[in-house]
Image (spheres, helix red, strand yellow):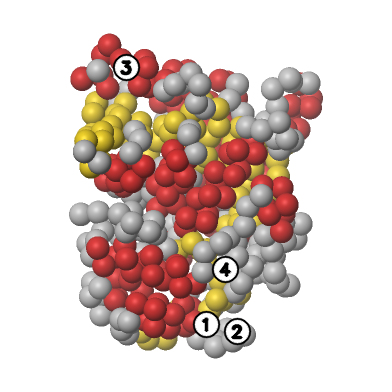
Amino acid sequence: MPYKVILSISINHHVYCALVDINDYFPAYRHILKGFNMHSPTILVTGGAGYIGSHTCIELLNAGFYVLVIDNLQNSSEESLKRVADITGKSVTFIKGDVRDKELMKEIFSENKIAATIHFAGLKAVGESCAMPLEYYDNNINSTLVLCQAMEKAGSKNLVFSSSATVYGDPETLPLTENMPLSATNPYGRSKLIIEEMLRDLPESDKLKKTDNPWSVALLRYFNPVGAHESGSIGEDPSDIPNNLMPFITQTAVGRRTELSIFGSDYDTVDGTGVRDYIHVVDLARGHLKAVQKLLSKESIEGVQAYNLGTGNGISVLEMVKAFAEVNNVKVPYKLVERRPGDVAACYADATRAKMELDWEAGMSLDDMVRDSWNWQSQNPEGYM
C-alpha cells in the first residue's frame, strides 16, 4: 500500500516538512508510523487533501488526534497536506487512492485501528452534476457504500458524513431546521440525500442483529464554506473551473479572470441575487472536530443525527462581492448572467441543534471570511502550483 508520512521537524523554531514513503525509508518503523500512537485515537479523513478536509486535519491534529488521509487528488493537491504539517508541526499519513477501491479500503481498516472516519471524498458541483449525473451517483454513492462496508467489517462504526444543505431542496420557509422535509433539485443534492437515507438504515440493521457495537453517525449539513486558514498557507484551490463563488471572486481580484459572472439577478431576494449561508471554513472544520469528539464521548450519538452547520445569516452574492472589495481594497469586476440550473433563491440555516448537542457555533465574521480568502489567494495567486 502506498503509505506516505508527511513528517514535520522543528529546528531552531523553524518547521521543515518532508514527504516520506514508509515502505522505502522506514521499514523498521512502518508499523509504528502507520498505526500511530496507542494512546491517541486515529481519525481517517477521506478527501482530506481537499479544501474543507485539509482545514479539518489542522483542527484534528491540534486537538491531539492522529490523522490518516486517503485522497485520489482529483480535485486537490498533496501540497495542502505538507502545509498542514508545516502549520501544526505534526505529521500526517497520506494514502493516494480512491475510496471506491474495495481492496484498498479493506487493507486500510485491517492495518489501522481507526476510532472514527470523516467522509469528505466526493464530487460537489451543482451545475456539473446536472450535466454528469451518472458520474456523481457513481462517485458519491459508491464511495460511501464501499467505505461503510469496510467500516462494518472492521467494527469501526463511528462516522461523520459531509452532507449538504442541498438535501433541503427549494425550501418553502427559512431558516432551515433539521426536521424540515428533504428533497433535491439536482443530482449532487440527490446523491447526498440517497446517502443520508442509506446511512439511516444502518442503525436499524443493528437493532435486528442486537449488536453491542452499533453505528454512530453524524450527518453534517453545511452551506457555503469560504475563507482560509489565517496563515494564508492553505485555501480553496479548484483544479479546474471553480464551482463555488469565492474562488471566482479571488481569481478575478488577483487577475486570473477578467470578470466575475453572477448567476441570476431576478430572484426574490434583497438585491435579486442568490442568498446563501456563507460559513468560514475554519468554523466548519471545528464543527467536524466537535462531531468526532461527540462520537467518541460517553454521550455519543445513538444511531444517526443530522446537524446544520451555518451562521444563520443569509448573505447575497452581491453583498459578498461588495464586502470582499471593501475589506480588501481591491476591485472585482462582475456581470449579471442567467441563472444556473439547479440553484435555489435562498438558503440559510438554523444551527441551534449543533450548539446544544455539539457545543458548536460559528464565530467568524463576514470580514474574516473575505479577508482570509484574499490572504490565501494573494499569497498563492496560482494556488498550490
Q: What secondary structure is found at the residue carrying circle 1?
A: loop
Amino acid type at circle 4 is Asp
Distance in Å between CA atoms under marks 4 and 3: 44 Å
Distance in Å between CA atoms under marks 2 and 1: 6 Å
Asked if marks 1 and 3 touch (Cβ < 8 Å), the reply is: no
Q: Which residue is mark 3?
A: 30
Q: Is residue 243 above or below residue 259?
A: above
Tell me where residue 115 appears, x and y as whole percent: 55, 27
Amino acid type at circle 3 is Arg
Q: What secondary structure is found at the residue carrying circle 2?
A: loop
Asked if marks 4 and 2 touch (Cβ < 8 Å), the reply is: no
- Front-most of 228 and 243? 228
Dot placed on the residue nearer the N-terminal end, 4 or 3: 3
Query: Who's the residue at 62% across and 57% down the image?
Result: 361
Which corner quadrant holds the N terminus?
Answer: top left
Q: Which residue is mark 2?
A: 269
The 10 Å Cα crowd at callout 2, few under 14, some 14 to 19, many 20 or more, is some
Query: Who's the residue at 55% across and 86% down the image?
Result: 272
Dot placed on the residue nearer the N-terminal end, 1 or 3: 3
* Mark seen at residue 108: none
Location of residue 21 by image quarter: top left
Q: Which residue is mark 1?
A: 273
